[in-house]
Amino acid sequence: MPDAISSTKRYLVVDGFINSRGITTIKLSRTYDISSSTTSPVETLATVSIEEEGGQRYLLREGSTKGTYTSANLALNTIKNYRLLIRTTAGKEYASDYTPVKTTPPIDNVTWHPTDTGLGIYVNSHDDANATQYYKWEYEETWEIIPLLSPQLEYKNSIIQEITTLFPKVCWSTAQSTDIKISSTTRLTRDVVSDYLLRSFSTTANQFRYKYSILAKQYALTPEEYNYWALLKKNTENIGTLFDPLPAQITGNVHPLNDEAELALGYVGVRSVEEKRIFISRSELPANWNVLTGYEVCVPPDTIYIDRPKPPPPPVADILRSAFGLGSSSWPLAPVYDGSNTLIGYTSATLDCVDCRRRGTAVRPSFWQ
């Protein structure tokens, strides 16, 4: 590693935007060595506020998530300019440039189309006033998870007994978008975005095993912010081959106020947000798609058979302990029955294969239908 990279200074990183019609969320962290195995250090106990040019300030407060600051539900004046002010516990001050408010047009619709190779999700929008022209999207996706086994028994304290706390039969996993989705209509005669590819999947994607939902979020950008995201996209997603663009220095709109030697990373825009959610069920997709479960590595071990329909005596428990590698802690078991509904044995799997909370949450999302 070059010396300049292995001795990275901890510069401030500002992630978020000022929401002109709602709650503003800003995340503050610090840069760290590229060779470091730790996560990005967060900036806690800072004083963060939104300032109207020539007007009042609105305070953001740090919540239970360290380094994340949120405002009240605000309705900002669309003809004013706003900026973000930051003061750290070390006394260093930063501010973004005063930026005009961009009003985001509604999303016309979010559609999806299956093909022979997979599924694409698309977003459509327009602005009759031709005032937007620069668009950015993010998304939040959620899908159902049903575990491989639903144990009703457990091996605990060297005996097999009814399970004390049943595992959930369904969970929901959620993921946020990480790639940069932007588009410009400046070369078009009308301010229209048609079938912009928001997300794509293969025919085996386990997100569609049962039911899937995606929430599309649309933002209007200024030309300056669009250029910032376009350059960031080139630097992070379009390098690695001979013909890709060379990395370039990224300059945001956040600047130090009392220390010229400092540096801050990030671009704080001011805009409203438009959202639209859709659902996709497995029954709506082609029947010949080999959609995975996500539990393909969880094939249960061989069933341990018993020669009687009653709960096994201790010797069989010893067999289970040896076969499944059971210790003294609780271990889930699933009974195995023959065609006459007679218990003939037991099978088991690791907790990752039976407890779907390890892959999501058992709390049903409020929007789920």
Image (cartoon, rainbow, N blue to C red):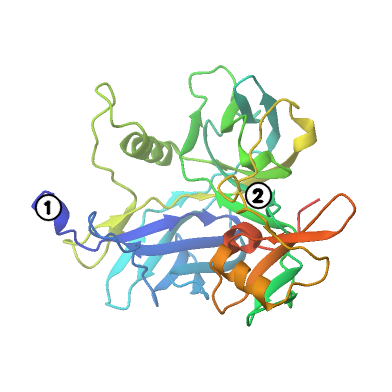
Query: Of marks 1 and 2, which one's residue comes earlier in the chain?
Result: 1
Residue type, numbered disc 1: Ala
Residue 288 on image: x %, y %: 72, 25
Residue at screen point 53% across, 67% down: 325
Q: Residue furthest right?
A: 340
Q: Which residue is mark 1?
A: 4
Residue 321 on image: x %, y %: 58, 70
Using the image as rendered, state which of residue 123 and residue 296 is in the foreground: 296
Which disc, if any, is residue 142? Answer: 2
Q: Is residue 337 left or right of residue 201?
A: right
Q: Give the structural element (helix, strand or loop) at label 1.
A: helix
Residue 141 seen in render:
yes
Q: Give the structural element (helix, strand or loop) at label 2.
A: strand
Residue 261 on image: x %, y %: 16, 61
Q: Nearer the viewer, mark 1 or mark 2?
A: 2
Q: Separation of disc 1 and disc 2 at Cα? A: 41 Å
Residue 29 on image: x %, y %: 36, 64
Residue type, numbered disc 2: Thr
Q: Residue furthest front?
A: 307
Instruction: Bin the neighbour count of mark 1 within 10 Å (Cα to Cα): few under 14, some 14-19, many 20 and up.
Output: few
Q: Is residue 96 left or right of residue 319?
A: left
